Image (cartoon, rainbow, N blue to C red):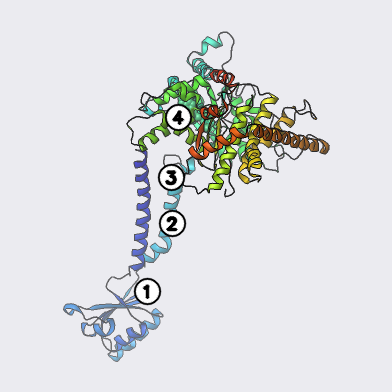
Amino acid sequence: MGKKLNNKSSLGLYWIYIAIGIFLVAITLWTPGGGTKEIAYSQMEQALRNGCVKQITINLNQKTAEAELDPRCAEEYTGKKSSDGNPVNVSSTIPAVDEFSKELKGLKEEGLFKGEEKYVNDQDYTRIFIYAVLPLLIMIVFFVFINRRMSGGGGGGIFNVGKSTAREFDKSKAENKVTFQDVAGLEGAKQEVEEIVHFLKNPQKYTTLGGKIPKGALLVGPPGTGKTLLAKAVAGEADVPFFSMSGSDFVEMFVGVGASRVRDLFRTAKEKAPCIVFIDEIDAIGRARGKNANFNSNDERENTLNQLLTEMDGFGSNSGVIILAATNRAEILDKALMRAGRFDRQIHVELPDLNERVAIFKVHLKNVKTDDSIDIDFLARQTPGFSGADIANVCNESALIAARKERNAVTKQDFLDAVDRIIGGLEKKSKIITAEEKKNIAYHEAGHATISWHLQFADPLVKVTIVPRGQALGAAWYLPEERQLTSKQHILDKICALMGGRAAEEIFFGILDTGALSDLEQATKRAYALVTYFGMSEQLRNISYYDSTGQNEYGFTKPYSEATAQMIDSEVQRIIDEQYERAKSILRQYSEGHNRVANILIEKEVLFSEDLESVFGPRPWASRAEELLADSKPQELPEAEAESGEDQ
Ligand code: ATP
């Protein structure tokens, strides 16, 4: 439907272009005077002398003479015979009207010109049109066009540029009918926003006890966790007007527009109170104001923010307007915006835990035709760290995969393929990999697998593949433990598992290649975090240089001396070296198993934890990992160790 409308409007624009084009071509081709042929002045004189002219009309304004020729002379002056003996018209520009009149008079006296002589005062309307009216018309069309573009096709336009572009939510439309039922999980957040709906419905209940209704609530959380969905559900459930706009809608190319739109938004909101205003991606305007006015400052954005702060202060807490805003970067927002009295409440919307993922899968599987092999619990376990949007994407992607395979219903395998695709990118089976490279990649991945199998705190392995996907030549998938705290041993084991790929290459081939880039990057970052953030290294015990305020925007100054910087570097190097040696010794110890794992990979290209179990026997810590997995606590994103090759 939307597409059709778009086509229509773009066709409308094309019509304007086509009409202007045809008009310009027609103007150029059209010669005034219809059938009149333009001839040289000398020819005109000659025609007069030869007695060919029956009548002559002199245009005083245009300094032209139009002569009606005798049909006998038509061919001589126009190159064409007169049809049916009709007179033929020719015209020419004359040097000066006075001179020409004198000349005509002389010719008359000599008896050479016997025809009539007329003087007219005609205007050349075509010229006037082309030089005066047409540019004006083009300007008007251009202006109308710009105006329509600025107003986004609807009303408004350049005169209304300062008006807020907030859309009032139309609950009668089917696509807007989002209710709290459609938001799976997020119980805490749902409860808080439901409370806001209650405030607006029965304000007295809260105000009689002396309470003040909050002015605003900020939904904070990672991308795709359902913040916008939650706000839409509020709109669907609350029986009050709901205005929605995005932070970037305030910004326009004109100075002062942002501030004026904020004023307009609040004026409209107050008129329609009680109501809810939702500002999505508020970080577009709410970013902390710079301290140095000349450096990297953005006056327009700051003015808009200042206006927002003023307006939020300006209305009484019981005026019935509640501002909801969403962002995934609360740390960069201006402190003034977050203080009580403005956005009094911060509602954290986290990545869903296991149970919430089950609930989200249930919401999104409603419209997917699945077969009996689907086990929602299993799917939820396979997707740790996925956001609601990722899960919606998995459901959609699996339906597409099943359709591509001409299936009647979506199977478990389609879901697993969709998950792999979303984590690792599209399989690139056609990527040219030599047999030697394949062996290298297999040993590298087998190194990660072997080490993570033998370390107590390394994340349990799910799958290893050497089929290139996206940017990676091979990948190992782990299920991160669902835990809140990470111990030093966890970090060290993780670094050791990361170094496993390169260690395997060195032990078995004696060469280093670029495939370990991503591993090294991750290991180095973890080692730096261990030393500088978590204060876990021996040399720099219990010291953290982490800045949660995000104030040191430009990183020009470091909060430690040069000597400490050197100490940090040497500690990081020591940790990495130790873990690398540890990885090598584990691989030497289990070299026979490692070889078998690599050979399975070369043969089958994919390997699951069951294959590892058949090689090394059951993992002593598997039961603990299982136990943790069953626990439904928030978790980190799954790690897909991607090895980039030389060619990338
Ligand atoms: P961003 O910060 O990037 O704007 P967001 O948090 O606003 O993201 P939404 O736009 O609300 O994310 O979510 C995107 C989509 O993900 C929704 O349209 C919905 O299909 C799905 N989704 C996210 N969370 C949930 C949930 N809790 N229940 C059901 N669906 C969800």
Q: Is mark 4 within 8 Å of ligand 1?
A: yes
Query: CA gap, disc 2 to disc 4?
Result: 53 Å
Give the label on residue 194, or none.
Answer: none
Could you say where residue 303 lies in the image, as x and y percent from the top left? 62, 37
Task: State the residue position of label 1.
Answer: 60
Query: CA gap, disc 3 to disc 4?
Result: 36 Å
Under tag 1, what secondary structure? Answer: loop
Task: State the residue position of label 2.
Answer: 136
Q: Quadrant of residue 101?
A: bottom left
- Mark 2 crowd level (few <14, some 14–19, many ≥20, 10 Å Cα): few
Question: Three-letter amino acid code at disc 3?
Answer: Arg
The residue located at (66%, 24%) in the rendering is 486
Query: CA gap, disc 4 to disc 1?
Result: 80 Å
- Earlier residue among tags 2 and 3: 2
Q: Say which of marks 1 and 3 sits in front.
A: 3
Query: CA gap, disc 2 to disc 3?
Result: 18 Å
In this view, the residue farthest toward the left is 84
Q: Quadrant of residue 208?
A: top right
Could you say where residue 193 lies in the image, as x and y percent from the top left? 52, 19
Task: State the residue position of label 3.
Answer: 148
Give the label on residue 392, or none.
Answer: 4
- Earlier residue among tags 3 and 4: 3
Q: Say which of marks 2 and 4 sits in front.
A: 4
The residue located at (33%, 85%) in the rendering is 43
Q: Say which of marks 2 and 3 sits in front.
A: 3
Under tag 3, what secondary structure? Answer: helix
Query: CA gap, disc 2 to disc 1?
Result: 28 Å
- Mark 3 crowd level (few <14, some 14–19, many ≥20, 10 Å Cα): some
Q: Is residue 644 left or right of residue 104?
A: right
Question: Three-letter amino acid code at disc 4?
Answer: Ala
